[in-house]
Amino acid sequence: MLDTRPSNEVLVPSILVTLGAFATACLSSTYVYLIEQAVCRKHFMVNDPARINGTDLVDEESCKIPDIQAQVASINGIYMFLAFLPGKKLPRGLTKIQNADRNCSILLYWSL
């Protein structure tokens, strides 16, 4: 009978990639909200200061206008581009991990 369970060689990297994608989504949602609040606050300081509450936050519904979303998208795009650059400029390293049965080569990319 065939064993249909995934091996550790497939399971561990799959879990790491999934956790990495989840962490990236959590981080992205946090900094996009902060960028949106900063752009929104700047916009309403000039146009309608009454919309800014006592904690310097603006209602999220008010921040969904196209002018503000366009600025948020451009700032986020520039951030993503600049965050991608160090990984392309640094050298790649190849390391070997010794297992009990065999050697596994893993290509590691590192960035700032």
Image: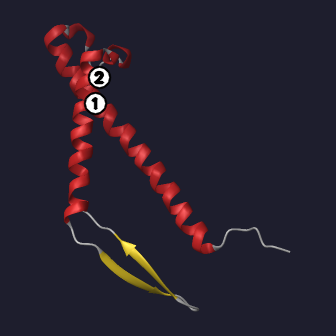
Q: Position of residue 41 (x, y in %)?
A: 22, 21
- Contact, mark 1 vs mark 2 (Cβ under 8 Å): yes
Q: In percent of the image, x 36 and y 20: which residue is there?
A: 60
Q: Residue at x 17, y 9 (%)?
A: 47
Identify the residue at the far left of this view.
46
Question: In the rendered image, which quarter is residue 43 located in?
Answer: top left
* Residue 4 numbered mark, or none: none
Q: Is residue 55 visible?
A: no
Q: Residues within 10 Å of mark 1 (few under 14, many from 20)?
A: some
In percent of width and height, residue 22 lies at 48, 49
**Could you tell me the amino acid type at mark 2?**
Gln
Asked whether residue 13 appears in the rendered view, the answer is: yes
The vertical placement of 60 against 82, above or below, is above
95 w.r.t. 88: above or below: below
CA gap, disc 1 and disc 2: 6 Å
The residue positioned 58% from the left and 74% from the top of the image is 9
Q: Secondary structure at mark 2?
A: helix
Front-most of residues 32 and 10: 10
In the picture of the structure, the residue carrying the numbered disc 1 is: 73
Tell me the quarter of the image containing the C terminus. bottom left
Q: Which mark is residue 69?
A: 2
Q: Callout 1, which amino acid?
A: Ala
Indicate the position of residue 73 as horizontal and vertical percent values.
28, 30
* Residue 4 found in image quarter: bottom right
Callout 1 secondary element: helix
Most extreme residue toward the front, as rendered? Answer: 2
Quadrant where the N terminus sits is bottom right
